[in-house]
Image: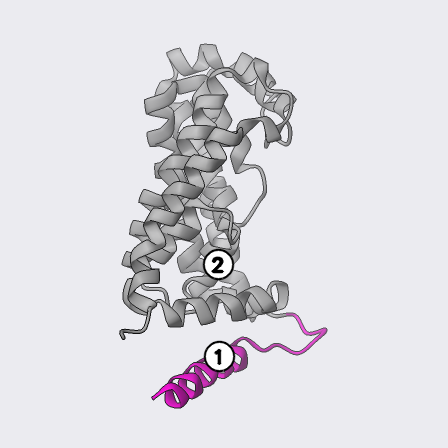
Amino acid sequence: MATTSVTSNDKNNDDCIKKTNVVVGEFPLTCFEVMVACGVVLGFASGLIGVYLTLPQSDYSFLKLPRSLQDIQILRDNLESYTSDYTIQVVVGYCVVYIFMQTFMIPGTVFMSLLAGSLFGVFKGVALVVFTATAGASSCYFLSKIIGRPLVFSLWPDKLTFFQNQVAKRRKRLLNYILFLRVTPTLPNTFINVASPIVDVPFHIFFLGTVIGLIPGAYVTVRAGIALGELQSVGDLYDCNSIATLFLIGVVSITPTLMASKPKS
């Protein structure tokens, strides 16, 4: 039985590698796949333009994707008045930008989470971050299902093989494993979003693991956004207590999987 299991896993890995294999130097996407990606970009751009056109005439030179704590502080200072007077436009604009960044793996969502805390407070901020992060991860999941296979194999071949093996071993307790990955920094969230459809993680498992698993980290980041002026660097977000708490939650979430994998005596 053990030999059969190993052979089956090896075969699955070989199939995954064959499906994701690309020729070095060749552009990994077809014309149709490029058109799909461009269509998604145009959809997000249309949403942002619609929000922009409904805002009052003003100087919006401060609007840009945040890349530092200073950028967040500038955005907060300028958006506070708009948030009270044009709440819907600010919330919609925030959601579109966050989901766009998640969908296309653009770094900086941690700064967007800080901004949510500074503008909306803890509870509304956490709800907004979890919603947008889950929507963006889901969007990335489905986009990757269409065009992501060659890209993932080109960017993360070793991680893809590792992830494929872990998913195959934990298929019966897959939700616990996805929760563990979301809570702890074992694998980057960006990689999980893109690779999950490729290694056959069902969407309902992916969705539930994302919604629940993102809450602890979102709470830590959003709470830090309220005291934005006290932060000196992004590293200040996670103190020893926060890291220990996240790992404890991660261990609890994966414990059923580990117990189920133990051979019965």
Q: Residues within 10 Å of mark 1 (few under 14, many from 20)?
A: some
Quarter of the image for residue 108 reads top right
Q: How is the image coloured?
A: one colour
**Side (left or right) of 176 relative to 69:** left
Q: Is residue 106 visible?
A: yes
The amino acid sitting under disc 1 is Asn
* Residue in the foreground of this view, choosing between 22 and 31: 22
Looking at the image, is 68 positioned above or below residue 44? above
Is residue 117 part of the magenta span, yes or no?
Answer: no
- Quadrant, the N terminus: bottom left
Looking at the image, is 123 positioned above or below residue 243? above
**Side (left or right) of 52 relative to 21:** left
The percent position of residue 191, horizontal first and vertical second, equals: 52, 56
Residue at 47% in and 31% down: 242
Residue annotated with mark 2: 194
Q: Tag 2, which secondary structure?
A: helix
Residue at 37% in and 57% down: 177
Residue annotated with mark 1: 13
The percent position of residue 31, horizontal first and vertical second, equals: 56, 69
The amino acid sitting under disc 2 is Val
The percent position of residue 91, horizontal first and vertical second, equals: 39, 26
Spatial separation of the CA atoms under disc 1 and disc 2: 17 Å
Residue found at the far front of this picture: 265
Residue at 54% in and 78% down: 17
Q: Which residues are magenta?
A: 1-27
Q: Which mark lies nearer to you, 1 or 2?
A: 1
Q: Main secondary structure of the magenta part?
A: helix
**Side (left or right) of 2 relative to 226:** left
